Image: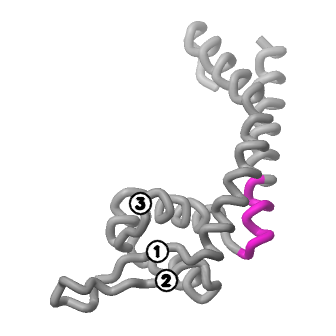
Amino acid sequence: MAENMIVFYEALQELDNARRSLNDLCAEYHISFEQFVLMKRILVAGGIRPTELSDELHISRPAVSRKLTQLYYSDYLSKERSQTNQDQRIVTIVLTDTGRSVVESLDESYRERLAQITEPVKKVTDTVEIFEVLGEDI
């Protein structure tokens, strides 16, 4: 049992180190991981309204607004007003070319790093399954 706990905690430490390295990648572009997630979602959608981002990612509207404002001032995204809608307050957020290249670069780096954490994830899930079978809490 003690061996399983050691393997479990070592795997958790590996995952935490991986999380930190992913955050470090974002820091190179002066953004947070959360901002990267927003940018990735905007790229996938081809443009999206801030309220939709908030709803889809379960982030408060004020938090989304702050994160988007920082990205806007960093020239990673732009705001487009609807040409057909009478309400000009409604905007769609799209990535600039700079923002698109940041997301593509981070995506490539993330894929490389995520491939390295497959084993720690497996160790954690295997250990949790062992504890569930034994009926013990971690």
Identified at 80% across, 70% down, the residue is 28
Side of 78 relative to 18 (left or right): left
- Residue 58 percent coordinates (x, y): 40, 58
In space, the residues marked 2 and 3 are separated at their CA atoms by 14 Å
**Residue 11 found in image quarter:** top right
Name the kind of residue labelled 2 in the image: Ser
Is residue 29 rendered magenta in the image? yes
Asked if the residue at tag 2 contacts the one at tag 1, i.e. Cβ–Cβ closer than 8 Å, the answer is yes
Q: Nearer the viewer, residue 110 or 135?
A: 110
Disc 2 packing (10 Å; few <14; some 14–19; many ≥20): some
Magenta extent: 22-30
Residue bearing the label numbered 1: 94
Mark 1 falls on what kind of element?
strand
CB-based contact (under 8 Å), mark 2 and mark 3:
no
Q: Which mark is residue 131?
A: none
Of 39 and 130, the residue lying toward us: 39
Q: Which residue is mark 3?
A: 45
In the rendered image, the residue lying farthest to the left is 86
At label 3, counting other C-alpha atoms closer than 10 Å, the crowd grade (few under 14, some 14-19, many 20 or more) is few
Report the disc number at residue 78. Answer: 2
Q: Quick one: 68 or 93, which is closer to the camera?
A: 93
Residue that lies at the very extreme toward the top in this rendered image = 134
x and y, in percent, of residue 74 in the image: 64, 85
Q: Is residue 51 left or right of residue 37?
A: left
Examine the residues drawn in magenta and state their main secondary structure: helix
The residue at 77%/43% (across/down) is 112
Q: What's under tag 3, amino acid-wise?
A: Ala
User: Residue 21: image x %, image y %?
Assistant: 81, 53
